[in-house]
Amino acid sequence: MENSDLNFYIDYRDERIGKYELYSPPTTGHNIDIWIKYNEIENKLYYSSYAPPVWIPIVNGDYLAFWEIKGKGVPVTINFPNGFWENCLYVYVSNDNHPELVWTSYPEASILYYIIERNDGYTTWEQIFTTTSVSYIDNEVDINSVFEDVIQYRVKARINSTTTSGNTNVAWIDNAVLHKEKQLNSQNLLTSKNNSILFETYPNPFNPSTNISYSIRANNFVSLKVYNSISKEVAELVNEIQGAGNYTIPFDGRNLSSGVYYYVLSTPNYWEVKKCC
């Protein structure tokens, strides 16, 4: 599958797998539970649990549970090897270019919900969401090759009002940037560790123009560029030494096609990306 961006998750957490008296193997062919094939011409994945195979397309990002494919109801996990929960979290890029997390149900007990935690490398672990599902898309994070951050995730299960499970493995994704609402005031302008702050555009969405504002605490070389969703530079707005202060730069996008664009502010010791639509 070289040069393919296809992803899927197989949940094999069922101790009956391989016990053919329970799973009724095919009468011909190999005694296996499931076939996976890749069609290079179509760039598509398929699976089958029948002999002869009846191929079912795998949608990119699919969650495939063996016991559901085999029509066996819920999984049997009483004697499943320890350590599965600690190695079950996976993250990949969704169709909308956000991190999509998928994991498996907590193996030892019924639970109230799952707790999703995130670490962007600049803060400590923080809880960002709770869900009863086994998947989550983080819409606060965008994935694009112009970005440089690495975002980490982990999941724990809330078993009851007083008990929480241990963490899953830490899953990470790069080429990412985290967009969060910030309290922008004189205090954090003075305490910003990078001595610069990039503000949200206004208006956003823009049609056909917008304004990009930022703050520079000390004299520095400043670059402000705009990229499209495939990382192609479409505008260079600033490329010079600027003194300390607040700046607002107009950006005229009337000659650009509709879509998502990213503006990047950089100085010798600072780099930040934000999205405008």
Image (cartoon, helix red, strand yellow):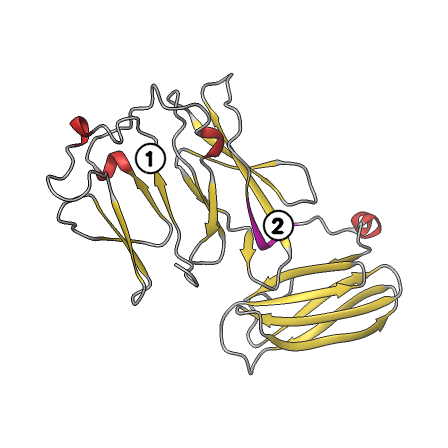
Helix, strand or loop for disc 2: strand
Question: Element type at marker 1?
Answer: loop
Q: Please name the residue that numbered disc 2 is placed on.
A: 150
N-terminal of the pair, mark 2 or mark 1, is 1
* 41 relative position to 49: left or right: right
Circle 1 residues within 10 Å: few <14, some 14–19, many ≥20: some
Residue 261: quarter of image: bottom right
How many other residues sit within 10 Å of disc 2, few (<14), some (14-19) or many (≥20)?
some
Disc 2 vs disc 1: which is toward the camera?
1
Please state which amino acid type lies under the numbered disc 2. Answer: Val
Q: Amino acid at mark 1?
A: Tyr
In the image, farthest residue toward the left? 27
Q: Is residue 210 above or below residue 10?
A: below
Majority secondary structure of magenta residues: strand
Give me the residue at 32% from left, 64% from top. Answer: 40
Q: Is residue 199 visible?
A: no
Report the span colored magenta: 172-181
Q: Which residue is pictured at 75% across the width and 74% down the height?
A: 238
Left or right? Give the position of 65 relative to 212.
Answer: left
C-alpha span from label 2 to label 1 = 29 Å
Q: Residue at x 33, y 63 (%)?
A: 43
What label does residue 12 carry, if any?
1
Q: Is residue 43 above or below residue 239?
A: above
Q: Is 174 in the magenta?
A: yes
Image coordinates for residue 114, horizontal then vertical, percent: 46, 31
Where does the image place residue 159, in percent across and percent down from the top left?
45, 21
